[in-house]
Image (tube, rainbow, N blue to C red):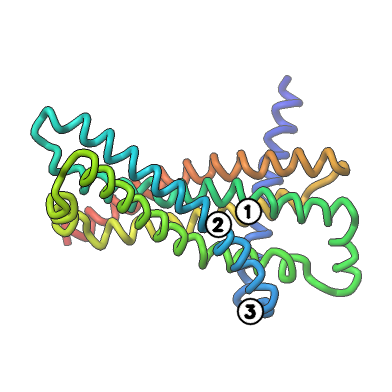
């Protein structure tokens, strides 16, 4: 039992080291010698433009549900006027970044892992190395930059759709006035809330892209290995997004409180 536990621990530490090494190598490659516009444009399109539909539907329906739940829970307490604030705060600081990260991981991250995993088991990545081409620079860096740039933009779109969905529910179903929905947002939603959402979105974008690419680059075992790596990449990305969301929430709010006291 001890030997098995020790091997598992060493394997986990080895995987963490390999992942950190990949992230550093890709970051250096992206900054030192950015990928060509053709490669980058393709990834921006697939990761960003092609994800608009699923992100918009997710954000819109989430805003619907938030507005309905907020109104039902608070109307009998005389607090229905905070429905807009609750929808806006929740979408900007938490649900917008998290749901966007989840949707993009399921739609694009899994495809990234499967594509790179197939290239790995068919020795296409080894062929790139034999031609003196760095796979991290050629394959991973364009996806890394696309994730860093497009996830925050998709998050903004999701937030806007969520607030709009909540507006439709609150105004046209619960008969709130538009001013009662939007005016409290101007008072209670601060630049710190927006910054928090955007920082989370950028971190989630880096995490989901690098985890899925790492799992793809380490795939082995033929077609079965590709399927296994794809599943592991999605599950691992979800877990890391949730853990990092908690850590970022605590860290950013602690820093905000410290700066307010200065």
Query: Which residue is at 17% across, 42% downward?
Result: 175
Disc 1 versus disc 2: distance between alpha carbons? Answer: 8 Å
On screen, residue 144 versus residue 83, left or right, reads: right
The answer to whether one can see residue 18 in this image is no
On screen, residue 56 versus residue 76, left or right, reads: right
| Residue picked out by circle 3 | 32
| Residue picked out by circle 1 | 108
Quadrant of the image for the C terminus? bottom left
Q: Secondary structure at mark 1?
A: helix
Mark before the other along the chain sequence, 1 or 2: 2
Q: Are marks 1 and 2 in contact (CB under 8 Å)?
A: yes
On screen, residue 209 versus residue 79, left or right, reads: right
Disc 2 versus disc 3: distance between alpha carbons? Answer: 29 Å
Query: Which residue is at 71% across, 31% downward?
Result: 6
Mark before the other along the chain sequence, 3 or 1: 3
The answer to whether one can see residue 213 in this image is yes
């Amino acid at each position: 039992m001890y030997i098995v536990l020790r091997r598992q621990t060493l394997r986990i530490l080895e995987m963490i080291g390999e992942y950190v090494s990949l992230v550093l190598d890709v970051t250096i490659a992206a900054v030192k010698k950015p990928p060509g516009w053709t490669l980058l444009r393709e990834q921006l399109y697939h990761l960003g433009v092609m994800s608009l539909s699923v992100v918009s539907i997710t954000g819109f329906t989430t805003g619907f549900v938030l507005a309905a739940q907020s109104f039902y829970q608070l109307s009998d307490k005389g607090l229905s006027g905070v429905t807009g604030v609750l929808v806006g705060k929740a979408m900007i600081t938490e649900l917008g970044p998290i749901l966007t990260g989840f949707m993009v991981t399921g739609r694009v991250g899994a495809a990234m892992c499967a594509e790179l995993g197939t290239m790995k088991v068919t020795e296409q990545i080894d062929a790139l190395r034999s031609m003196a081409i760095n796979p991290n620079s050629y394959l991973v860096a364009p996806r890394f930059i696309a994730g860093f740039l497009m996830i925050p933009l998709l998050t903004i779109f999701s937030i806007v759709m969520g607030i709009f969905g909540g507006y439709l529910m609150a105004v046209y179903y619960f008969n709130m006035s538009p001013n009662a929905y939007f005016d409290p947002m101007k008072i209670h939603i601060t630049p710190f809330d927006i910054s928090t959402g955007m920082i989370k979105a950028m971190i989630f974008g880096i995490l989901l892209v690098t985890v899925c690419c790492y799992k793809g680059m380490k795939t082995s075992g033929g077609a079965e290995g590709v399927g296994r790596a794809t599943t592991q990449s999605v599950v691992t990305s979800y877990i890391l997004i949730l853990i990092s969301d908690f850590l970022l929430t605590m860290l950013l709010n602690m820093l905000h409180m410290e700066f307010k006291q200065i």
